């Protein structure tokens, strides 16, 4: 049994709920971290092997991301134990049962995450229809905004890039972009940056790395990916191993795949001016310190990739897609500017500046409550 209070601090977690229903083989956990800003929003992850501590760390990341974006929501996260590729009927019964078990849990709003999608969110909403239908990331037919399809996170990254480019002395027109992880986040970031004149010269997925200094045709690459193939099936350019994406020369390098892909061992290989963190925790602290010493400007994940959760929160409050996009642009631009101004003025690490800003916003909300955390 993990000591659930071992990692508690002044910000949370407010509560941890373990759910067990033996007739279904349902085992799941919900961590509600800090709801001083309002009910928590965070993804429902379906995976066989996420510990309660990891679920807590993901919930805390949502507390900070939602606070940084000044959303009226706290941070939470839930995990349903199981293989997400299980038969649909079984998955539906588990998702529905978990939602039912949390029917009175007003402090948590479900969102999609690894192993769950808009259909899962529709099941959750159906289970919770008489108690507020607390789910976001719903199908468009149910009033949702399909945030991965429309590229909400990539849209935010492109706005973070505009601010970062000014600080790094880069012109976006003609800037070379490399994306590690040409998926929902990476491909839309490339598309929106292309709209500002930047050129995608490198892209990687699990199959390997594509490099074409002449510029990659985004529509052709998207068609390849939509047909289930890899970036290395692109007809032109050089095909390299997966890790070679780190070495590609560019002005903007975007990690949009996995955590901890840039660490102390490979950070010296980066040949870029700016790292825009599309993935969550893609760089270790040591790597971020090394980047700063090397004059590479890095925009931290929970500032740069907040577009997805901003879109989800806007959906929850009934906004249209165009209103959600306007809000993402406004909030990500303002936050990136505030963080990078602090970096320029105080020589801080960008992550420390972002944390200071987010923690300040959590504390401000806590000070208005009878109890701080909930
Ligand atoms: P996705 O599954 O759509 O895309 C991920 C891509 O990364 C795929 O193309 C995959 O082939 C590639 N990939 C995986 N491992 C790789 C590796 N080792 N090297 C190179 N490529 C690799 O996922 P996504 O929704 O785009 O999310 C990507 C990251 O961004 C995740 O860390 C996620 O937590 C984070 N994120 C996503 C959102 C969102 O709105 N979807 C918002 C914030 C943060």
Image: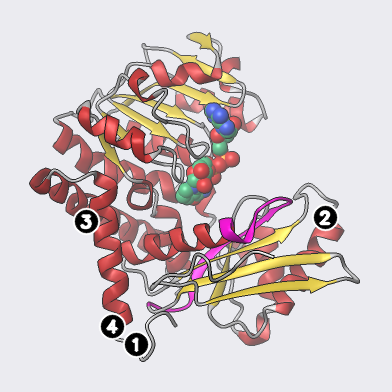
Q: Secondary structure at mark 1?
A: loop
Image point (18%, 50%), residue name = 337
Mark 4 → mark 2, Cα distance in angstroms: 45 Å
| Residue identifier under label 4 | 367
Q: Residues within 10 Å of mark 1 (few under 14, many from 20)?
A: few
Label total for image: 4
Residue at mark 4 to residue at mark 3: CA–CA distance? 24 Å
User: Marks 2 and 1, Cα distance to the nearest angstrom?
Assistant: 42 Å
Task: Name the secondary structure under disc 4.
Answer: helix
What span is in magenta? 37-54
In this picture, is 236 found above or below 346? above
> Mark 1 vs mark 3: which is more N-terminal?
3
Q: To which residue does mark 3 refer?
A: 334
Question: Which residue, as the protein is rendered here, is positioned at the far bottom?
Answer: 370
Q: Residues within 10 Å of mark 3 (few under 14, many from 20)?
A: some
Label 4 CB less than 8 angstroms from ligand 1 = no
Determine contact: label 1, label 4, CB under 8 Å: yes
Q: Earlier in the sequence, mark 4 or mark 3?
A: 3
Q: Disc 1 to disc 4, how far (Cα)?
A: 6 Å
Q: Secondary structure at mark 2?
A: helix
Question: Which residue in the protein does label 2 denote?
Answer: 88
Residue beneath disc 1: 369
The quarter holding residue 19 reads bottom right
Indicate which label's residue lies in the foreground, 1 or 3: 1
The quarter holding residue 272 reads: top left
Residue depicted at x 39% and y 28%? 264
């Amino acid at each position: 049994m993990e000591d659930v209070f071992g990692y508690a601090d002044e910000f949370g977690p407010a509560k941890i709920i373990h759910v067990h229903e033996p007739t279904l083989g349902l085992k799941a956990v919900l961590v509600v971290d800090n709801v001083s800003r309002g009910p928590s929003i965070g993804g429902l992850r379906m995976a066989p092997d996420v510990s309660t501590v990891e679920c807590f760390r993901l919930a805390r990341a949502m507390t900070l991301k939602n606070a940084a974006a000044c959303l009226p929501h706290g941070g939470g996260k839930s995990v349903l134990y199981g293989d997400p590729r299980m038969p649909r009927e079984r998955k539906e019964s588990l998702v529905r049962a978990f939602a039912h078990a949390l029917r009175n849990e007003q402090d948590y709003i479900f969102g999609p995450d690894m192993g769950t999608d808009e259909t899962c969110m529709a099941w959750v909403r159906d289970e919770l229809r008489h108690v507020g239908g607390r789910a976001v990331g719903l199908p468009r037919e149910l009033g949702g905004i399909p945030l991965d399809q429309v590229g909400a996170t990539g849209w935010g990254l492109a706005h973070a890039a505009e601010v970062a480019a000014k600080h790094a002395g880069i012109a976006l027109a003609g800037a070379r972009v490399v994306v590690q992880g040409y998926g929902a986040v990476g491909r839309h970031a490339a598309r929106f940056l292309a709209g500002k004149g930047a050129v995608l010269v490198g892209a990687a997925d699990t199959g390997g790395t594509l490099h074409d200094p002449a510029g990659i045709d985004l529509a052709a690459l998207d068609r390849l990916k939509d047909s289930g193939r890899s970036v290395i099936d692109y007809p032109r350019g050089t095909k390299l191993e997966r890790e070679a994406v780190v070495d590609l020369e560019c002005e903007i390098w975007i990690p949009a795949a996995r955590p901890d892909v840039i660490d102390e061992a490979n950070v010296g290989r980066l040949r870029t001016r700016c790292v825009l963190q599309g993935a969550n925790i893609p760089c270790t602290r040591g790597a971020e310190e090394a980047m700063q010493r090397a004059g590479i400007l890095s925009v931290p994940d929970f500032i740069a990739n907040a577009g997805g959760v901003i879109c989800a929160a806007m959906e929850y409050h009934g906004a249209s897609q165009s209103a959600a996009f306007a809000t993402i642009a406004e909030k990500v631009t303002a936050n990136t500017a505030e963080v990078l101004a602090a970096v320029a003025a105080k020589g801080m690490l960008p992550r420390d500046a972002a944390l200071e800003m987010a923690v300040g916003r959590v504390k401000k909300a806590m000070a208005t409550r009878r109890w701080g955390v909930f």
